[in-house]
Image (tube, helix red, strand yellow):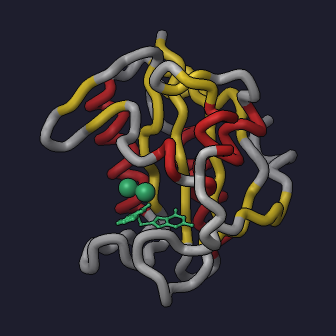
């Protein structure tokens, strides 16, 4: 069994409902057990500006799936939730990314772990630190990565609890 951390985001339609549906998809997925969920944060878009604000959260899971099986599961859940891939980094109903998978470091054409840009994204690090305050990413505490992010409008505001979302 491996422990993995996943990032979830939505900035189209009923954002909260898409996150909820994404979590339900994970809970229902064979070989996945959701063990922790962060709160939901409302965050400024990074990469492409001029799109709606995101809701983001991070989930900790235990899984018997391999990294690529987990990736397929994430893509299937995105698809079930109407994800369309047109504009790179554009608005989306649901995005589900693998951040960490045990201490695995791997780089294939379709999957890079740890997630290559997670160290520079407050919308990932803030919810990750909420559920795992001591976590180390690529040799450095996530809290230190977060402090190193320049204050350039990467706003992350508490939005809602996920208290009732996993039994
Ligand atoms: C230069 C070039 C600097 C590209 C940054 C950063 C690109 C992040 C893409 C970048 C660059 C991304 C979310 C988001 C996206 C999300 C918030 C991406 C992929 N997803 N912003 N932007 N939350 N707040 O989930 O992360 S698009
Ligand atoms: Mg993403
Ligand atoms: Mg993605």
- Disc count in the image? 0
On the picture, is 35 further left or further right than 39?
left
Can residue 17 be seen here? The reply is: no
Residue 110: x %, y % from top left: 19, 43
Q: Quadrant of residue 112?
A: top left
Location of residue 144 with respect to 87 vertically, above or below: above
Location of residue 154 with respect to 2 vertically, above or below: below
Residue 155: x %, y % from top left: 69, 68
Can residue 3 be seen here? The reply is: yes
Location of residue 70 with respect to 95 vertically, above or below: above
Residue at horizontal 71 percent and vertical 32 percent from the top: 36
Residue at horizontal 63 percent and vertical 78 percent from the top: 14
Ligand 3 rendered quadrant: bottom left
Q: Nearer the viewer, residue 135 or 26?
A: 135
Q: Quadrant of residue 158?
A: bottom right
On the picture, is 70 further left or further right than 166?
left
Location of residue 135 with respect to 119 vertically, above or below: above
Residue 108: x %, y % from top left: 16, 34
Residue at horizontal 49 percent and vertical 69 percent from the top: 46
Q: Nearer the viewer, residue 140 or 102?
A: 140
What quarter of the picture does the C terminus occupy? top right
On the picture, is 56 further left or further right than 115?
right
Q: Quadrant of residue 123?
A: bottom right
Q: Residue furthest bottom?
A: 50
Q: Residue furthest left?
A: 109
Residue at horizontal 48 percent and vertical 14 percent from the top: 2
């Amino acid at each position: 069994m491996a422990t993995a951390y996943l990032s979830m985001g939505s900035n189209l339609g009923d954002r909260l409902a898409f996150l909820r549906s994404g979590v339900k998809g994970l809970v229902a997925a064979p070989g996945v057990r959701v063990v922790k969920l962060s709160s939901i944060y409302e965050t400024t878009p990074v990469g492409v500006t001029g799109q709606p604000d995101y809701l983001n959260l991070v989930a900790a899971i235990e899984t018997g799936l391999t990294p690529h099986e987990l990736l397929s599961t994430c893509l299937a859940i995105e698809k079930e939730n109407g994800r369309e891939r047109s504009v790179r980094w554009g608005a989306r109903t649901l995005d589900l990314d693998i951040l960490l998978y045990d201490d695995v470091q791997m780089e294939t054409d379709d999957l890079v772990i740890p997630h290559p840009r997670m160290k520079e994204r407050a919308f990932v690090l803030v919810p990750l630190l909420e559920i795992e305050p001591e976590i180390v990413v690529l040799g450095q505490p996530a809290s230190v990565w977060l402090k190193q992010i320049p204050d350039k409008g990467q706003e992350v505001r508490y939005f809602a609890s996920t208290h009732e979302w996993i039994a």
